[in-house]
Amino acid sequence: MPPRGLVISGTQDPYVPLDTLSRFAQRHGAPLHVEQDAGHWSIVERPQSIAAALRAHWAG
């Protein structure tokens, strides 16, 4: 994972449990952005919210 990675997950993802992504993010020192009531394709479901999270991450 790149040193400035960001893990993005939806709370309703039926394929990858949130606790799995949380452990992955912790293991790699990456922040975790959790999109409430979004599924596996949260980046498509909530493009504005995810774009804002990415902009904030890259600005930091």
Image (spheres, rainbow, N blue to C red):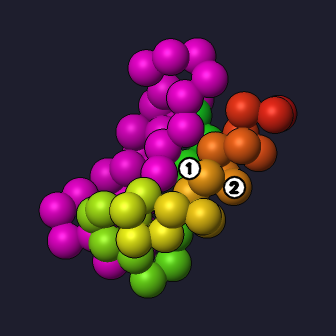
Above or below for 26 versus 11: above
Secondary element under disc 2, as helix, strand or loop, is: helix
Using the rendered image of the protein, determine whether residue 17 is visible from the camera's viewpoint: no
Taking the spot 32% from the left edge, 52% from the top edge, the residue there is 20
Estimate the x, y position of residue 11 in percent, counting from the top left: 41, 74
How dense is the environment of label 2, judged by Cα within 10 Å: few (below 14), some, or many (20 and up)? few
Q: Residue under label 1, please give it.
A: 32
Q: Which residues are magenta?
A: 1-29
Judge whether residue 31 is colored magenta.
no
Report which quarter residue 10 is drawn in.
bottom left
> From the viewer's perspective, is 22 left or right of 29?
left
Q: Residue under label 2, please give it.
A: 52
In the rendered view of the protein, which quadrant contains the C terminus?
top right
Front label number (2 vs 1) = 2
Instruction: Name the N-terminal-most of marks 2 and 1.
Output: 1
In the rendered view of the protein, which quadrant contains the N terminus?
top left
Using the rendered image of the protein, determine whether residue 45 is visible from the camera's viewpoint: yes
Q: CA distance from mark 2 to mark 1?
A: 14 Å
